[in-house]
Each structure stands twice: as structure tokens, then as C-alpha cells.
Image: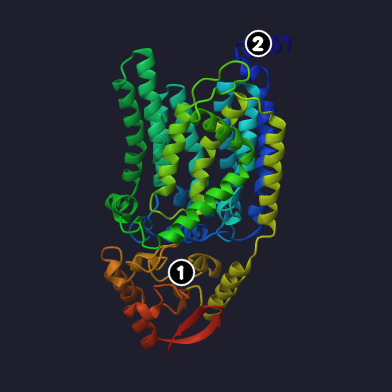
Amino acid sequence: MSLAISRLSALAERLPERVRTGYWTRLVPALALLAVATHIPSFLRPVWSPDEGYLATQARMLADGGVLYDTVVDRKPPLLPWLYEACFAIFGSVSLWPLRTLAIVAHLVTAVLLASIARGRWGNRAGAYAGALFLLLSIGLSPEDTQAATFEVFMLPAMVAAFRYAERRRWLAAGIAVALCSLTKQTGGAVLLPVLWMLFQDARRRGVRWLPALFKIGFGFALPIALVAMILTKPKGFLFWVVTGSGDYATFGSNWLQMLGRALGNSAILLAAGLGFLLPVGHRLWLRHRGRPVPVRGESYGSSTDLWVWLASSVVAVSVGFHFFGHYYLQLMPPLVLLGVAAVCASAVRWKPVLVYSMVACTVFWGLAIFWPGQKLDQTTEVATAVAAQTTPKDTVLVWGMHPELYWLADRRPATRYLTAGFLTNYSGGKDGQKVGEQYSVSDAWQTFDEELAAKGLPEVVVDDSGTAPYQPVMIPRIESLLDTHYEVVGVTGDTVIYRLKR
């Protein structure tokens, strides 16, 4: 026993100082508790957003033999659909609690990585505050955007890891992390910009060759994408749906006032949530703009240019497509937190008011999540219950709308691979009726739609969830003709109409 103890002691002496002092063994459990506490409301609803419903429906289709980017399509990369499919295979598909649990783990990993970056730059206390502030800020938007287990949440760990690896000059690992980020959501690839910035700045300062490191980044980025393409049975479909086929979707609509309002509104909400640590950032920027000396507490904390490059690349990523949905803004949170920590560390601002404000703001958003209105979910659940009553598990259903969670809640198979009307009309949430109609659909989508109905038979039930949207049946002749010829109304719930096949 004494020999074993002596060996363990010798091993402990060889461990890095940060491990021997127990910094992480104390910090990680505390951050884990905070991550659970801030995201407990996520378990209170069966589904928070259409994205969750889309992913859940996709996962069921894949489990039934569907082929991604062929008979199961979306404009997103494959990692998260595969994760949903794996969770459903292990835990069943009746609940999203496994995904919500993994989302908490993703938030925790992001917080730990941010703590590691901040600790390396500004010390132990800064590391702990960076992790905590991120978790407090992570629910600082609409609950539908922050409590759902969607793309941005699972993208953040790889994004922060890419920055951390680049900071440590581990260029191959940084490239792999950028690829994983991009394979979760395309806009995650924006972190490549600060990675390259750090590479060239490092080469300039140290006078070393940058070409080998650039090759490592490129190889690390290309390798996971190539492996994914090899796994997919339809790599051309992957290229189309994820890259080349989203041009019409990501366009600037004519309703720029609505777009601007959403952009400013979500920016204001995020600013209010992080005001405690963003005020010092703004104050320092104002002093520099006015040409006044910037006060520094203690030693200089170095340049944060790479963090500003990271933030700028994230702003561009959030703006792509001009949708400005709230969950897009999650991508801004990591660089904002680090910039805030840097500003507080290098100024006369004390941590106590920053933490108090952040905790109060977090409590407000936590309360919003608990008491968030559920009328739309109640209506969707009511419609799903009616659809389930009108059909059998062997029947197919067509939801003509933008709420694919109806398929999952009703536990019925979609009649087509196009789970929302957007693929067939070019409509997307938050845009007006410009360039919406049959003629603006995804290439060959209507031909494929007709072939699917011919092969599978007409769906037993059609749910018209379009309301007053610019793709309502009276504006889409094919859907209007389909309903008039083959269907009769069997129910109306709110602005949703349920049709059943005529006998």
C-alpha cells in the first residue's frame, strides 16, 4: 500500500500545476450545477421550436430507412440529425429529454473551454468568471431560442475549441474543430477567420513559416468533411442541400423594416442580458474613440484583437440570410463574454456588481422560461391529437405549413420528404411574400413531390397550418387543386384546418 501511495505521489508531482491545485475539480462541478439550474426549464415542454420538431421528425424518418439528403432533406449539415437519430435509437423517440440533457452538457463544455481561455490570459479568477458569465448569459434571449436543443447550442463547443486550439498553436486540431463546427451548422465555419488571424499574427511575431501550419488547418478542416461525404450515400445531395441549394433561401427580402426590427430587437435583448460585463467594454471603446487614456488596473492584459476578429466573424455569420432569429445570436455569446472579462480585468470595475447584475438578468430570463405563454404549443398539440385520432400509424400525413413538430407530436409519417412548405414555395420564417410561390421552389421539388404522392398514395390527412401566410392554398394552385379534388374539412383549430381524404 505504501509503495502504491508513493507512486501516486510521484505521479502527482509530474502533473501540471493547474491539476495539482484542484482548480478544475472545484470549478467544473460548480459550472455543471449552474448549467443544470439555468436550463432546467428546457424540460418543461415537449418541444420548444420548429427546429426541434424538424430534427425529431428527421430522426424518425432516418430510423425508418430514410436516406439523408435524398428521401430526408434539410438545409443543415448532418451531425445534429445523426445525434437525434442515435438518441432515439437508445432512449426511444417519444421525448426529447436526452437531447435536452446533451444540450446542457454542450453548454457546460463551452463554459469550461471559455474558462480555460480566460484563465490562460487573465488568471484563475477570470477563468471562473468567464465560465459562469457564459452560463448566466446563455439563456439571455427568448426561451424558445435558448432552451431548445438546436444547432447553435451544439455548435458552440467546437467553435470555442477551435479558437482555443489556435491560441495554443495546435493548428491541426483547430482545423478539425472548425470542420466539426461547420458540420453542425454552416455558419459555425466563421470561426476559421480568427483561427487564420492568429496563425498569421503568430507567424509575424515569431518570424516562422506559416505555410505548414496553414496546411495543417486545411487538412484538419477537409478530413472530417471528406469522411462525412464518404459515409453519406448521396454526397452530391449533401453538397446541394448544405451549400449550393440555399441561395434563394439566404436572400435579402423586401420587408427590410421587419428584418431590421428583429435584428435590433434581439440585439437589444442580448445587450440587456449581458449589460453587466458589456458596459466596461463600451466604456473602454468610448475612451479610445475620444482619444483619452484608457485606465488599466495592475499589469497590462495584452491585446484582445483576436477576440474582436472572432466577434466580427460571428456578427457576419448571424447576418447571413438576413433572418436574425434569436437563436442565431447564441454564436455571439462566447466572444462577447471573453471581451467582457478582458475589460473588467483591465479596468477599475469590480466583479461583484458585474456578477450581481448578470445573476439578476439570468433570473428574469429563467422566470420567463418558466412562465412563457404556451398557446401556440397548446394549439399544435390539439391539432396533433386530432390528426392521430383521424389516422392510423400506417397512414401518411401532409402538414402544409412551417411547423413540422406536428408530425412528431402526432407520431405519423410525413407524406413527403419536404417537411415544410418552404421547400416548395421558397417561404422562410420572418420574410414577406416576395419570391414566394410554386415557381420559386427548390429545383425539381414539385416533380419529386408528385412522384412521392404517386408512389405512396395520397396522404390520409392534410393539415393546412398556413393561416394568412403568402403560401396559403389559395395562392398555390397545386395545393388548392389537391384539397378541392380529394379532401374534405373535418376540423378547425384556431387558424389551422384539418382535411381528410374523401371516401
* Residue under pointer 1: 413
Please name the residue that numbered disc 2 is placed on.
7
Residue depicted at x 34% and y 13%: 207
Q: Mark 2 or 1 closer to N-term? A: 2
Kindly identify the residue that appears in the image at 51 percent across and 30 percent down. Answer: 290
Q: Disc 2 to disc 1, how far (Cα)?
A: 60 Å
Residue at image point 51% right, 35% down: 335
Question: For this rendering, which residue is in front, 463 or 306?
Answer: 306
Q: 160 or 177, which is in the foreground?
A: 160
The spot of residue 86 in percent (x, y) is 50, 50
| Residue 90: percent from left, percent from top | 55, 51
* Residue 10, quarter of the rendered image: top right
Q: Identify which residue, 427 or 461, lies in the foreground.
A: 427
Residue depth check, mark 2 versus mark 1: number of the one nearer the observer: 1
Q: Locate residue 70: give its quadrant.
A: bottom left
**Tag 2: Cα neighbours inside 10 Å, few (<14), some, or many (≥20)?**
few
Image quadrant in which the C terminus is located: bottom left
* Color theme of the render: rainbow
In this rendering, position of residue 447 left or right of residue 422:
left
Q: Amino acid at mark 1?
A: Arg
**SS at badge 2:** helix
Tell me the SS state at disc 1: strand
